[in-house]
Amino acid sequence: MTPATSPPTAALTESITGTIADLLGLTTDDVVAERTLFDLPGFDSVAIVSVLERLEDRWRVEVPADGIVPEAFETVDSLAGLLSVAGADGGRS
């Protein structure tokens, strides 16, 4: 996978929110209304893998395996941080 530069925060946040909403059959308002992503119905390990794959493809980044920890998927902001770091270092941490 060719590394990309870090995506802009607003665009990345919107992309994450839309991806999660689409995958879970929710609205983006539903996604942002929850305190954590784990409070969303259906946001489980299978959903995490699907969301991450879609976002890596969309932003042309590869998140290193050691970055895939529960804390990285707690909120849209924490997930944006994970993807931004992957974009900034080409997926190598």
Image: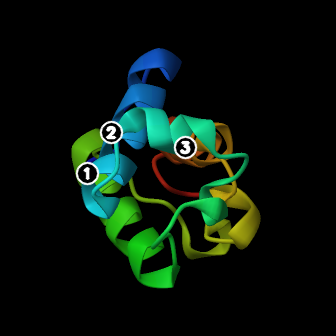
Give the structural element (helix, strand or loop) at label 3: helix
For the residue pair 26 and 90, the one nearer the viewer reads as 26
Number of numbered discs overlaid on the protein picture = 3
Density class for disc 3 (Cα within 10 Å; few <14, some 14-19, many ≥20) is: some
**Given contact means CB atoms under 8 Å apart, are the residues at marks 1 and 3 in contact?**
no
Q: Give the amino acid at mark 1.
A: Asp
Compute the Cα span from label 2 to label 3: 25 Å
Q: CA distance from mark 1 to mark 3?
A: 28 Å
Check disc 2 and report the residue beneath it. 18
Disc 2, disc 1: CB below 8 Å? Answer: yes
Task: Give the mark nearer the N terminus: 2 vs 3.
Answer: 2
Q: Which mark is residue 68?
A: none
Residue displayed at 33% across by 62% down:
24
Q: Position of residue 45 (x, y in %)?
A: 51, 82
| Residue under pointer 1 | 22
Q: Amino acid at mark 3?
A: Asp
Q: Which mark is residue 89?
A: 3
Q: Is residue 39 above or below residue 77?
A: below
Image position of 55 with respect to 18: above or below: below
Residue at the image position 33 percent from the left and 54 percent from the top: 56
Give the amino acid type for the residue marked by disc 2 in the picture: Gly
Is any part of residue 38 visible from this angle? yes
| Residue at the image position 58 percent from the left and 42 percent from the top | 76
Residue 40 vertical position relative to residue 28 in the rendered view, above or below = below
Left or right of 64 in this view: 72 = right
In terms of secondary structure, where does tag 1 sit? helix
Q: Nearer the viewer, residue 25 or 2?
A: 25
Rendered-image quadrant of the N terminus:
bottom left
Residue 93 visible somewhere in the drawing: no
